Image: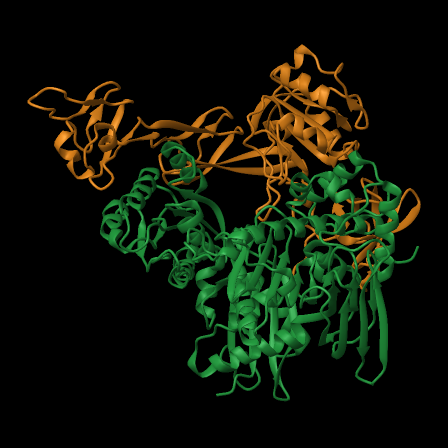
Chain colours: A orange, B green
């Protein structure tokens, strides 16, 4: 039989988190297998080819493109400085010469006698990749990067904005169903990753931005507030490249939704620890969810990796959460998994699960359920 | 040798679908189908795993042994295996291209048409006159990392320097392919033939350059075929080689693997040509909406890359505006609540509408996604621009220009919908209504949906080149298309013109196959549905003096029309459809149109 998957976000007390740290183009890798690295440590670097400038020499000197080599004082591969003379016409009897200076410092990449233009390339731009999480280098990708492996507690959110960030974790909301308000966010949170309960409104998030809080982890956020933060309406859930001071990780969804008990308790357990978060989300094939990685210290590492880390199918007694109206956000236990298709109110015929919520049995399409991974 | 069993798969980005076609009593029919999650990504990273899983479902259902030692048995032996195995693919994001042309609306547009027709997503069009400075173009090319670039520009014998300048920009950007760092990016040159040497000098060492015939040899003519074929070849040779497991899959198939939308397009093109009809086909997916059309014998395809029902659902909202979505919703809802609900569908794309309220919302968004995609299609599917036309005095009064849309709704014969929201709507009436509301057909138009989105597999089947099977394969593709692929919804009949509310705009006399005669008057603003099966029905349609049903104002038409699972739909609403702005009147109209079609449950 074909395999069936049930979507679920990971909330793991102990996991072997593997992070591939790769350069955009080939370069130099600084680490070897087995090296221990800190989150901020540079593991690989390269030089991106510099920006190019195209200079229409023939046009500027009013000559035919084919004559370009007669006026140039430079060759392909030469280095030039900004303001350096690169071309000059002969003029009339040595008078009325027209000349051209290089607009930038760089290298002459090409000279074309078809279009009469030259290409000057600026100096290369250095690019570095850090380890992102502390741990051990478990693999080397030749000339491209490394894989860092870390024993860590690991939490996935459902949606986020902003890229990678690091800082000390601080639980700010007293409970998983309380809202993170503007009054809750204080100057002392600057540079930290703060955790709220069910929701953060736009004003509170703006304050976090202002105070340079490095990250906010919260149950819910309003979809329509995203426009104010990003400056545009988010049409497709592909994020991570926004230039935001404060990355946001939403653990449950849009709206005011209390954070799942397990997520909240796990984060609370590690209050004060140095953590890495990433708001990058990609909801397409090759799904990427935002995450919080909390590297564990030696004494905290148990021998047993979270047993439920594997992607288990839904079964009787599985703990599940409804992820679509009309029961959105409710958590229950599976009591029956009938194999026949059932007709919903919308008349859609679907595979369902019968789940028990607050002593009441309800029927929900299986695809509207999310597994809650428990220990 | 007679072709008896055909196995075809479509490896989508989330699901791999397999179908088995067999020769049953001298007719090709779809007999079994199976599906399984696509396995391009970790932990499997081998597309063939998903293919085998989907085929295993067929094995279980058909009791036919098709797989042996993790391989498909082909050719068949003693009732085991299949005669041919073919596949399409859009896994891993499909084929992503960038095109470049000298003039954006001329060679740029021709290059875009060729790339789209081959089944790719066009990430950007770089043109000499696109308003961007050279360094901005270079930055953009570097960021995009396409799978392939199509470079065109200049008519044969025309100026050389502009297209060489584009090549210099490409060379300076030194673009890297999206998948894999160890091969050179494929670039196809399809421009002025006189520039070939210079293009080779400029780009030859940096990219994997292929030279094909000019896409626009003269202004008045487009020559897309050589570029399209080359795109398909390179898709197989380069892009597919980089995707996990595709080398193995390619060794199994009896015809080249085609990009999914390319296969659908070629099927629609074939049907339009064989039956001499005009067709519009739409495939609305989670992330994108593809529209295909054949008008005046010209095929066009567009991809609305960010209009879809799950991954891109919020983009539909952003592009159409909340009010345009809300106008179709037959109840009051808080605007903020609605945006959060739609946002939650985007971040949890696999959920389905359980309540009727959720279904209303989803189908309202679908109408807007389809409407916007079709609008983009109409703007793209135009005649060639930049052509000088001989004009008479009467043309001058018509104000016609080159580059007019080829899409003429009054000429449209067949509108085919596919994709989850249309193919799997709980009631077929809902599919028909969504198609009518979004596409607004005029005159007489047949409506259909692709039952399980089989068009990709049938498209590649129609292109099997193996000598001994090619004729049978084409026959099989056509037979299965008509008998198993399409679900005929019926015919939409819409008179066009200006009418007062409550005015009779069409008189209808129908003679059914059993001889029964039905008469009907259609009143302006209403929808009337008559149940009728898919069989020819003699119809006399007489529009009122200001209305046109296809032959001009007030002109009567006698023709055969076809019913279907929904039947005959007489649509008396104007074009574009006017929805009252007053809330109470809007709800009344929306509900009465819906009731006329029995679109939703009564309560």
Q: Which residue lies furthest to the left in this view?
A: A93
Q: Which of B62 and B13 is in front in this view?
A: B13
Where's residue A201, x and y in %? 74, 24
Where's residue B594, x and y in %? 84, 56
Residue B325 lies in quadrant: top right
Residue appearing at x 38%, y 43% in the figure: B176
Q: Nearer the viewer, residue B560 or B415?
A: B560
A186 vs B16: above or below? above
Q: Is residue A152 left or right of residue B521?
A: left
Q: Is residue B395 left or right of residue B58?
A: left
The C terminus of chain A - image quarter = top right
Residue B21 visible? The answer is: yes
A199 vs B291: above or below? above
Residue appearing at x 79%, y 31% in the figure: A256
Q: Nearer the viewer, residue B134 or A239?
A: B134
The N terminus of chain A - image quarter = bottom right
């Amino acid at each position: 039989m074909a395999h069936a998957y049930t979507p679920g976000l990971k909330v793991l007390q102990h996991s072997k988190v593997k992070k591939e740290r790769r350069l955009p183009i080939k370069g130099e890798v600084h680490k070897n297998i087995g090296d221990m690295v800190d989150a901020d440590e540079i593991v690989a670097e390269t030089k991106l080819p510099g920006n190019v400038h195209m200079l229409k020499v023939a046009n500027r000197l009013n000559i035919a493109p084919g004559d370009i080599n007669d006026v140039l004082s430079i060759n392909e591969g030469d280095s030039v400085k900004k303001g350096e003379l690169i071309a000059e016409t002969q003029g009339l009897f040595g008078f009325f010469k027209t000349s051209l200076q290089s607009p930038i410092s760089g290298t002459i990449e090409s000279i074309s006698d078809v279009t009469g233009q030259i290409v000057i390339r600026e100096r290369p731009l250095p690019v570095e990749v850090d380890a992102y999480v502390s741990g051990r280098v478990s693999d080397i990708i030749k000339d491209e990067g490394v894989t860092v492996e870390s024993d860590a507690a690991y939490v996935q959110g459902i949606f986020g904005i902003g890229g990678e960030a690091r800082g000390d974790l601080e639980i700010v909301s007293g409970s998983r169903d309380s809202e993170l308000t503007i009054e809750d966010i204080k100057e002392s949170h600057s540079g930290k990753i703060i955790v709220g309960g069910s929701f953060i409104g736009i004003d509170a998030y703006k304050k976090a931005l202002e105070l340079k809080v490095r990250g906010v982890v919260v149950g819910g956020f309003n979809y329509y507030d995203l426009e104010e933060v990003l400056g545009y309406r988010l049409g497709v859930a592909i994020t991570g490249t926004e230039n935001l001071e404060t990355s946001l990780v939403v653990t449950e969804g849009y709206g005011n939704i209390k954070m799942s008990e397990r997520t909240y308790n796990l984060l609370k357990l590690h209050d004060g620890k140095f953590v890495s978060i990433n708001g990058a989300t990609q909801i397409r094939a090759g799904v990427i969810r935002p995450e919080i990685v909390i590297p564990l210290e030696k004494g905290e590492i148990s021998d047993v990796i979270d047993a439920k880390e594997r992607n288990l199918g839904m079964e009787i007694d599985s703990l599940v959460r409804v992820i679509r109206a009309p029961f959105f956000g409710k958590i229950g236990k599976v009591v029956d998994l009938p194999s026949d298709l059932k007709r919903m109110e919308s008349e859609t015929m679907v595979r369902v699960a019968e789940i028990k919520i607050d002593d009441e049995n309800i029927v929900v399409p299986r695809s509207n359920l999310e597994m809650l991974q428990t220990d | 040798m007679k072709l008896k069993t055909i196995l075809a798969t479509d490896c989508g980005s989330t699901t791999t679908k397999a179908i088995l076609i067999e020769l049953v009593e001298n007719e090709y029919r779809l007999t079994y189908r199976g599906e399984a999650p696509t396995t391009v990504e970790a932990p499997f990273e081998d597309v063939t795993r998903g293919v085998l899983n989907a085929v295993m479902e067929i094995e279980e259902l058909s009791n036919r042994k098709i797989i042996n030692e993790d391989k498909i048995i082909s050719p068949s032996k003693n009732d085991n295996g299949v005669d041919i195995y073919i596949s399409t693919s859009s896994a891993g994001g499909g084929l992503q291209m960038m095109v470049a042309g000298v003039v954006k609306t001329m060679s740029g547009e021709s290059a875009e048409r060729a790339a789209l027709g081959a089944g790719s997503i066009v990430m950007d069009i770089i043109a000499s006159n696109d308003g961007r400075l050279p360094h901005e173009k270079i930055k953009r090319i570097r960021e995009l990392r396409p799978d392939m670039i199509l470079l065109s520009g200049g008519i044969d014998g025309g100026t050389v320097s502009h297209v060489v300048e584009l090549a210099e920009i490409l060379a300076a950007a030194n673009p890297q392919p999206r998948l894999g760092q160890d091969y050179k990016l494929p670039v196809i040159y399809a421009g002025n033939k006189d520039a070939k040497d210079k293009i080779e000098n400029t780009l030859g060492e940096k990219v994997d350059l292929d030279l094909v015939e000019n896409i626009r040899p003269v202004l008045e003519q487009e020559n897309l075929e050589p570029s399209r074929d080359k795109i398909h070849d390179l898709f197989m040779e380069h892009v597919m080689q980089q995707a996990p497991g595709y080398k193995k899959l390619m060794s199994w198939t009896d015809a080249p693997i085609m990009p999914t939308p390319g296969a659908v397009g070629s099927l629609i093109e074939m049907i339009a040509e064989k039956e001499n009809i005009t067709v519009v086909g739409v495939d609305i997916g989670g992330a994108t909406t593809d529209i295909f059309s054949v008008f005046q014998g010209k095929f066009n395809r567009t991809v609305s890359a960010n209009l879809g029902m799950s991954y891109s659902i919020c983009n539909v909202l952003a592009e159409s505006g909340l009010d345009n979505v809300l106008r179709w919703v037959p109840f009051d809802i808080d605007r903020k609540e609605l945006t959060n609900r739609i946002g939650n569908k985007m971040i949890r794309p696999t959920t389905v509408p359980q309540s009727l309220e959720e279904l209303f919302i989803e189908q309202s968004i679908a109408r807007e996604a389809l409407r916007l995609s079709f609008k983009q299609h109409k703007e793209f599917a135009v005649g060639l621009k930049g052509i000088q036309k001989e004009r008479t005095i009467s043309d001058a009064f018509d104000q016609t220009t080159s580059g007019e849309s080829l899409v003429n709704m009054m000429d449209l014969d067949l509108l085919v919908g596919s994709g989850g929201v249309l193919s799997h709507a709980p009631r077929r009436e809902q599919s028909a209504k969504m198609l009518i509301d979004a596409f607004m057909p005029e005159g007489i138009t047949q409506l259909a949906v692709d039952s399980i989105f089989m068009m990709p597999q049938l498209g590649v089947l129609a292109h099997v080149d193996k000598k001994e099977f090619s004729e049978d394969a084409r026959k099989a593709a056509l037979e299965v298309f008509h008998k198993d692929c399409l679900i005929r919804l019926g015919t939409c009949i819409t008179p066009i013109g200006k009418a007062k509310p409550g005015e009779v705009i069409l008189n209808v006399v129908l003679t059914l196959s059993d001889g029964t005669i039905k008469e009907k008057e259609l009143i302006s603003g209403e929808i009337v549905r008559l149940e009728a099966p898919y069989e020819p029905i003699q119809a006399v349609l007489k529009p009122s003096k200001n209305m046109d049903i296809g032959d001009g104002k007030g002109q009567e038409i006698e023709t055969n029309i076809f019913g279907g699972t929904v039947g005959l739909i007489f649509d008396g609403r104007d074009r574009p459809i006017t929805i009252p702005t007053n809330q109470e009147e809007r709800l009344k109209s929306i509900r009465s149109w819906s009731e006329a079609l029995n679109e939703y449950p009564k309560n």
